[in-house]
Image: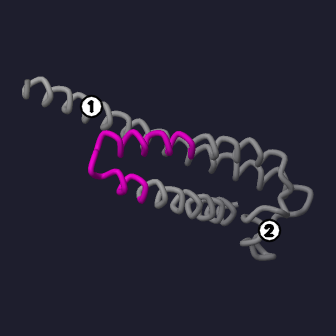
């Protein structure tokens, strides 16, 4: 069971890492305006949360033989067929929701930074008048 959790974690982590890299690259494109960069990052991480929640919901009914998790399991690591659907769907669902939670915390941080930069910008504009 621990091998299944580890492999599920690795597969979801890889997908989230690629999405995070894309979000980071977009944010770098807006680095000339930090407020917009963090707003964009916050919005895109919200989209990522939505995808993770949908994947968690889909994991309950998706055929275990068609998951990336199942492909990475060796014959010895695979649970019996009667038990495989329940195990793989439960582990994948928990893993997707865990990553959605962590992504939500990152999104909150980005939105807080966006608000901070908005307030700092407003303060600079008032002091310039």
Judged from the image, the secondary structure of the residue bearing numbered disc 1 is helix
Q: Residue 108, image x and y in percent?
A: 41, 36
Q: Residues within 10 Å of mark 2 (few under 14, many from 20)?
A: some
Identify the residue position indicated by label 2 in the image: 78
- 3D distance between C-alphas at marks 1 and 2: 52 Å
- Residue at 55%, 48% (x, y): give it: 99
Q: Where is residue 12, by image quadrant?
A: bottom right
Q: Which residues are magenta?
A: 25-48
Is 35 in the magenta?
yes
For residue 42, side relative to residue 67 (left or right): left
Establish if 47 lies above or below 127: below
In the displayed structure, does residue 29 sit left or right of residue 55? left
Q: Nearer the viewer, residue 85 or 17?
A: 17
Residue matched to label 1: 118
Residue 23, how many percent across, how many down?
46, 54
Percent from the top left, x then y, of residue 15?
A: 59, 60
Q: Are marks 1 and 2 in contact (CB under 8 Å)?
A: no
Of mark 1 and mark 2, the one earlier in the sequence is 2
* Closer to the camera in the image, 115 or 52: 115
């Amino acid at each position: 069971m621990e091998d299944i959790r580890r492999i599920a974690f690795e597969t979801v982590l890889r997908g989230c890492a690629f999405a995070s890299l894309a979000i980071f690259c977009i944010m770098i494109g807006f680095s000339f305006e930090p407020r917009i960069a963090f707003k964009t990052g916050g919005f895109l991480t919200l989209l990522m949360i939505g995808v993770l929640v949908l994947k968690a919901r889909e994991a309950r009914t998706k055929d275990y033989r068609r998951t990336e998790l199942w492909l990475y399991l060796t014959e010895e690591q695979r649970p019996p067929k009667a038990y495989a659907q329940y195990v793989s769907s439960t582990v994948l669902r928990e893993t997707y929701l865990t990553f959605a939670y962590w992504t939500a915390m990152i999104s909150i941080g980005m939105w807080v930074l966006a608000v901070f930069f908005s307030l700092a910008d407003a303060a600079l504009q008032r002091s310039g008048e």
